[in-house]
Image (cartoon, coloured by chain):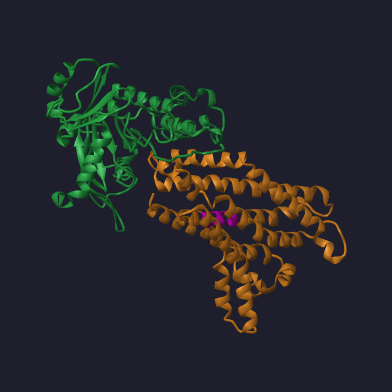
């Protein structure tokens, strides 16, 4: 089976700007990849190269084994869905008219338009002009547009930026449904919390290069970041000030009778064992390193270790 | 082709919905009727004038209006979609850049063509009905030529505005460029030619002058509509230099057609190289 996407030593330069440098990345069919990085890291450029809007300076792009700028690109594009970062659509048309226009371009039946408007929760506003839509409604319309024709590969560029928590949840839920149906998805984001449960793998980009790539679990162990354990005591109990366990790197008193401990991942069970025997213990919670701290770790590595990576 | 027609259909419906078609049609019809009625005012009487005079006045006015309308209609056709983010989206659809631009142009060309035909056509009918001296037979020929060439003039400035829109990075800059193009072709060019003519006391190489007139679609349009009539030719100033025997009407029409195709081909070339 061919991969949905294969990027091979892909570089893209605009004048003196190196938007992407030697990127190797692949996406299996039905896989969900989170593309992380701050603004200007190359996420949107990578998507535009996969879509065939930009041509690479060097390297190779293959989508379902085909060149997205090659002769078969018309047929290929029928199988792709794309939600750009900023799209405001046609203010004078209603949501239904906008979607119907894109549906005709993609040779999708008008029945799909009604179904998709319902799926993204826009059926009540379908006949209103897009001018009156909120940011969240426009994003829902954009998502419905990306889903036209049941694409095998979906590219979502910052789909949750500017959305309220409910709308964000809906986006993720739609993603989960599509994943269950075998759609490959690449989602780019610089908003990290919340994305973890919805992706199979992440790729962290920085200044146009791939900093790290793999499952979040693998990245965690690769980064060897400590985890955080939060212990809460009963109101009348006291914890010893020091010497809870030698492996604890840091202990900071928190609010509500709690203590926030920083512990190396390898010592997790030993420390927990010790903590559970504490008299007057009310609650223990373990927080693995967040995606944010992972991201910060790999980003710092880039800044400090230019020589190491060179 | 299917996709281009979908795009053309949307542009055309937008034109109907935004009242562009209605507005252009009304402007053309009212102006034409007014000119036909008051055209003789200079000679001291009100009432319908000779067809040739009406056509001459109409042509002088159309030469200002049609380019302006065409440029206003389409200056943001590409750069506007770019700014709203829909261009990026359209390019991910099974639609080539050439197909997209051609589709949009067809839509706008239909808007211009239909309004010109309706506006001046209605005016022509009104003249035939209300002017006892005008007959359909006498009016049909010159009016058809006028309407046909007016449509071509509109399309050529549409093509120019697509060139502007494909080249411009921002909508505001495209608007400025459109205005510049209008000034250049409609006002500055003729004034410069006139200046040269007066400055050199008419000692300009005649064939060079004729070529210079062909470099501007508005002058070709004027030549088509003015030189056909003797009386008009006398009144049309410097155009009298290029008299009718030098140019066949068919040749001029073909040249105006070239002024549609060439800028459009250039616009497509620029659009294909545009980064987005």
Horizontal side, residue B275 vs residue A279: left or right: right
Give residue B242's position: percent from left, percent from top: 63, 73
Give residue A162's position: percent from left, percent from top: 43, 35
Chain A: what color?
green
Q: Is residue B197 above or below residue A289?
A: below
Chain B: what color?
orange
Can the viewer see residue A22 in this picture? no
Give residue B267's position: percent from left, percent from top: 46, 55
Residue B69 or A261: which is nearer the viewer? Answer: A261
Res A206 quadrant in image: top left
At horizontal 57% and vertical 30% (from top left) the residue drawn is: A128
At horizontal 63% and vertical 56% (from top left) the residue drawn is: B66
User: What main secondary structure does the magenta stretch of the protein show?
Assistant: helix
Give residue A213's position: percent from left, percent from top: 20, 37
Horizontal side, residue B128 vs residue B12: left or right: right
Residue B97 or A60: which is nearer the viewer? Answer: A60
Within the magenta stretch, is there residue B170?
A: no
Residue A179 or A168: which is nearer the viewer? Answer: A168
Give, as a single range, the part of the protein colored magenta. B151-161
At horizontal 61% and vertical 40% (from top left) the residue drawn is: B16
Q: Is residue B15 above or below residue B35?
A: above
Residue A128 or B118: which is nearer the viewer? Answer: A128
Can the viewer see residue A13 in this picture? yes
């Amino acid at each position: 089976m061919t991969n949905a996407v294969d990027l091979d030593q892909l570089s893209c330069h605009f004048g003196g700007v190196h938007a992407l440098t030697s990127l190797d990345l692949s996406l299996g069919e039905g896989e969900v990849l989170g593309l992380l990085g701050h603004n200007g890291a190359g996420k949107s450029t990578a998507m535009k190269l996969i879509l065939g809007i930009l041509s690479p300076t060097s390297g190779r792009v293959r989508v379902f084994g085909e060149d997205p700028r090659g002769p078969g690109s018309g047929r290929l594009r029928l199988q792709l869905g794309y939600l750009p970062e900023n799209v405001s659509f046609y203010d004078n048309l209603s949501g239904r008219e906008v979607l119907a226009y894109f549906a005709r371009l993609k040779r999708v039946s008008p029945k799909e338009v009604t179904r998709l408007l319902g799926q993204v929760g826009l059926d009540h506003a379908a006949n209103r002009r897009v001018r009156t839509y909120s940011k969240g409604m426009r994003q829902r319309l954009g998502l419905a547009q990306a889903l036209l024709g049941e694409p095998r590969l979906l590219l979502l560029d910052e789909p949750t930026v500017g959305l309220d928590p409910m709308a964000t949840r809906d986006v993720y839920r739609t993603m989960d449904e599509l994943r269950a149906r075998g759609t490959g998805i690449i989602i780019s984001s610089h908003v990290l919390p919340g994305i973890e449960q919805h992706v199979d793998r992440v790729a962290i980009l920085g200044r146009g290069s791939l900093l790290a790539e793999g499952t979040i679990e693998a990245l965690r162990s690769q980064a060897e970041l400590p985890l955080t354990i939060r212990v809460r005591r009963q109101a009348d109990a006291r914890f010893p000030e020091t010497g809870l366990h030698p492996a604890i790197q840091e202990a900071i008193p928190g609010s509500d009778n709690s203590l926030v401990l920083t512990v190396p991942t390898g010592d997790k069970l030993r420390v927990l064992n010790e903590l559970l025997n504490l008299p007057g213990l009310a609650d223990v919670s373990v927080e693995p390193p967040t995606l944010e701290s992972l991201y910060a770790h790999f980003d710092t590595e880039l800044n400090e270790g230019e020589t190491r990576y060179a | 082709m299917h996709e281009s027609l979908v795009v053309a259909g949307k542009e055309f419906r937008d034109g109907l919905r935004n009242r562009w078609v209605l507005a252009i049609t009304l402007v053309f019809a009212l102006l034409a009727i007014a000119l036909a009625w008051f055209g003789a005012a200079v000679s001291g009487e009100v009432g319908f004038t000779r067809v040739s005079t009406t056509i001459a006045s109409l042509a002088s006015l159309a030469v200002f209006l049609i380019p302006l309308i065409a440029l206003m209609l389409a200056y943001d056709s590409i750069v506007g979609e770019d700014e709203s983010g829909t261009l990026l989206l359209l390019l991910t659809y099974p639609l080539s850049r050439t197909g997209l631009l051609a589709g949009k142009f067809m839509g706008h060309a239909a808007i211009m063509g239909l309004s010109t035909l309706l506006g001046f056509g209605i005016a022509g009918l009104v003249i035939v009905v209300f002017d006892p001296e005008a007959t359909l037979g006498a009016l049909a020929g010159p009016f058809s030529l006028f309407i046909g060439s007016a449509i071509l003039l509109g399309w050529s400035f549409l093509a120019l505005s697509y060139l502007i829109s494909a080249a411009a990075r921002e909508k505001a800059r495209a608007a400025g460029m459109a205005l510049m193009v209008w000034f250049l072709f409609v006002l500055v060019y003729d004034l410069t030619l006139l200046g040269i003519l007066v400055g050199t006391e008419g000692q300009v190489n005649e064939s060079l002058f004729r070529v210079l007139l062909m470099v501007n679609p508005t002058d070709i349009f004027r030549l088509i509509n003015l030189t056909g009539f003797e009386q008009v030719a006398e009144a049309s100033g410097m155009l009298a230099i290029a008299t009718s025997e030098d140019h066949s009407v068919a040749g001029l029409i073909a040249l105006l057609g070239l002024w549609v195709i060439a800028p459009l081909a250039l616009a497509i070339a620029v659009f294909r190289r545009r980064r987005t």
